Amino acid sequence: MNNDLQLVQSLKSALDRDVTQVKTEVSNVETETTNVKKDIIEVVKKVNSVEDLSKSAKTDISNLRAGLTGLTSNLFNGAAGGDSEKINQVEEKIKNLMENVTLVSDLASTTLSQVNNIRPELSLLGSDMSNIRNGVARLSRAVTSVTNPARFSCGVTGEEVKVSGVITYDNCSVNLDSMMNKSNGHATAPATGDYVLTFTANMVSSDSQAIWCALYKQTPGDEGWQVLGMINNYQQDAGEVDDRDSGSITILASLKKGDQVWVEWRGYGKSFLYSNPYKLITFSGYMITGEL
């Protein structure tokens, strides 16, 4: 029992350290996310500025085209009337307009080039933000797994249990998300991770006959099962005297999501398990580390 207590205390200390570390990492990620958001705002401002510049250039080109059309009409009218002064004025305006058209054309070309240069960066930025969101989601799951881990603690409040087989439970003081199915005695891992599992029972060996309890694990789809640990009570040559012993087992097991664990017992002769309202038979478990 002392070894079990020391193991649980050690695991609790490790759990506390993990919680502190995860909280620090989440705080760092939040800071980085805030900085990235500021950068995104600056990029969006620049893109909007480029887009506004592009719209302005389009408007200027449209106005120039309208002006050229009007000047062309005036040119023809002036030529028809023989007004050389008006023709010279029109030619001068056309010259100025052509210079403006060249400037607008260069500006539009530069604007398009800037937009094309920014697009790959925006695409990479979007990818980075997606990775950050995924990382935050994983850290959030990790924080949840250590601050509110999957857990159960169930017991038997009846008296003698004389039919060998899987132990079922009539009372659960803790059973988060119905991790333990009381009716069949199977607990299902809701997520992949490392779990602490503890089982305790009062075993009565009658007429020097053995009695044992074994902790099993099975992965869905697998035909076989695995024994994680066992306790027993057997006193040779005890005669007709019943030998009562409370045994317990505490282990650290790596479980995949959907794995099931349960305790099965067998008593030879008239050996049996004993409990009472104080729950001399209990089965508990909780996750200490989860998969990111």
Image: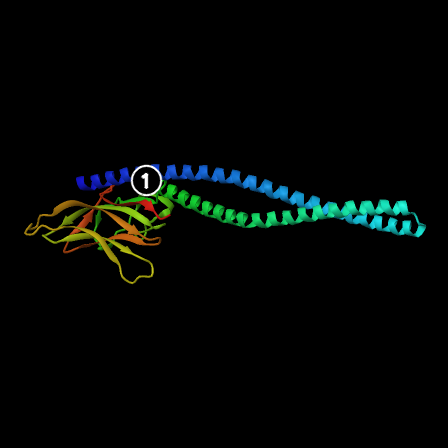
Q: For this view, does 110 lie left or right of residue 101?
A: left
- Residue 288 image offset from top left, x and y in percent: 31, 44
Camera-side residue: 120 or 23?
120
Camera-side residue: 200 or 276?
200
Q: For this view, does 159 lie left or right of residue 222?
A: left
Q: Which residue is mark 1?
A: 18
The structure residue drawn at horizontal position 67% and vertical position 48%, both measured from the top left corner, is: 106
Mark 1 residue type: Asp
The N terminus lies in which quarter of the figure? top left
Camera-side residue: 125 or 107?
107
Is the residue marked by circle 1 packed among few (<14), some (14-19), or many (20+) residues within 10 Å?
some
Q: Using the rendered image of the protein, determine whether residue 110 is visible from the camera's viewpoint.
A: yes
Residue furthest to the right: 81
- Residue 29 image offset from top left, x and y in percent: 43, 40
The structure residue drawn at horizontal position 51% and vertical position 46%, both measured from the top left corner, is: 125
Q: Using the rendered image of the protein, determine whether residue 1 is visible from the camera's viewpoint.
A: no
Residue furthest to the bottom: 223
Residue 282, quarter of the rendered image: top left
Rendered position, 179 above or below 18: below
- Residue 66 image offset from top left, x and y in percent: 80, 48
Instruction: Give the total number of marks visible in the rendering.
Output: 1
Which structural element holds mark 1? helix
How does the figure colour the protein chain or chains?
rainbow
Camera-side residue: 198 or 121?
121
Residue 221, quarter of the rendered image: bottom left
Q: For this view, does 46 lie left or right of residue 147?
A: right
The structure residue drawn at horizontal position 32% and vertical position 54%, both measured from the top left corner, is: 259
